Amino acid sequence: MSLLVDGLQYAKWSEKIFREMRCGGVDAVHVTITYHENFRETVHNISSWNRWFERYPELIMQGFAAEDIETARQTGRTAIFFGSQNPSCIEDDIGLVEVLHRLGLRFMQLTYNNQSLLATGCYEDNDTGLTRMGREVISEMNRVGLVIDMSHSSERSTLEAIECSSRPIAVTHANPESWHPARRNKSDTVLKALAETGGMLGFSIYPHHLNNGSKCTLQDFCDMVARTADLMGPERLGIGTDLCQDQPDSVVEWMRSGRWTKLTDYGEGSADAPGFPPMPDWFNDNRDFVNVARGLRASGLAESDIDGILGANWQRFFASSFGPADAGLRKAAE
């Protein structure tokens, strides 16, 4: 079976989901451990994951390096790599970048929809790009091996991050704006710049990012993947499902509103549909990656390209991204 890596999930973790990951053959997952949490709260979330690792050592293990994916695969487990969807976890202290990397954080978004201390989010009306602190934090993330994720960032901020970073960046969970014009999806300008600098795009299956939402068909999604392969090259593509399995609607309220507003922020939803949207019928949990593989074949992609999109491309990206920067490292694609 092909290597299988999911570039982003935020499920309500449980033994049931861990076993579904094993049933689906998922070798590694980048999991969100922080939305609006500060440093201490993020450490608490890591502590909670440590208890999961202790309780279910036959199902999951913490991932620190790309080699851990192969270890997990050989031992019948899923490697869990930590990521933050907001820079709130470093507060206003650049020194916490290295601290969190040592604790296992491997991805950090510079924004979550709103303006942060580092960059502009995709929901802001005024896109001012990277801040002074943002440029300094990018340099530090490059140094230690913490991947810059611009999934929820604005156009200018994303392009400036690509330019500023000495290492390839990622958009772990989004789709082309030309296919579905959601604020969270990315323009062809961004996608081309991402590919030209060796970055990665993870295709999202979250309904608000899909053409026709929850009614999006498998073939429409996979045909979009095939077209994006023509634009970016298949080696720059992966899957980042943004699966929020079993989460209550109170969690999507936290994701959107955090502590920054007293009002209800509906984000990509609406007052009529404020909660999590239903997933498309072809992808409800980790056992459904087989449907994605089938759809990619029907879209005419070569088997080697499908293997890359399902996991090998993420593995290669992890291998070049999670360790300290080499003196001779260049951001040009291999």
Image (tube, rainbow, N blue to C red):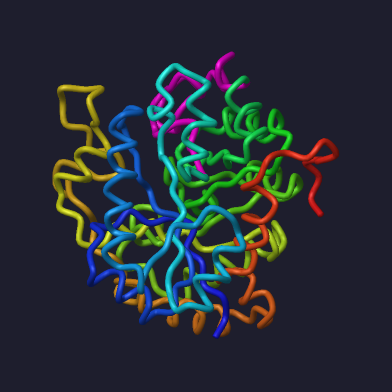
Depth check, front residue: 21 or 288: 21
Predominant SS of the magenta segment: loop
The residue sitting at 53% across, 78% down in the picture is 74
Left or right: residue 248 compared with residue 226? left
Q: Is residue 110 magenta?
A: yes
- On the image, the x and y values in percent for residue 186 come to 54, 45
The residue sitting at 59% across, 13% down in the picture is 132
Q: Quadrant of the N terminus?
A: bottom right
**Residue 152 position (above or below residue 202):** above
- On the image, the x and y values in percent for residue 287 come to 35, 78
The residue sitting at 63% across, 69% down in the picture is 312
The image quarter in which residue 251 lies: top left
Left or right: residue 19 compared with residue 193? left
Depth check, front residue: 30 or 116: 30
- On the image, the x and y values in percent for residue 79 come to 46, 64
Count of labels shown? 0
Q: Quadrant of the C terminus?
A: bottom right
The residue sitting at 41% across, 39% down in the picture is 85
Q: Which residues fall within the magenta stretch?
A: 107-135
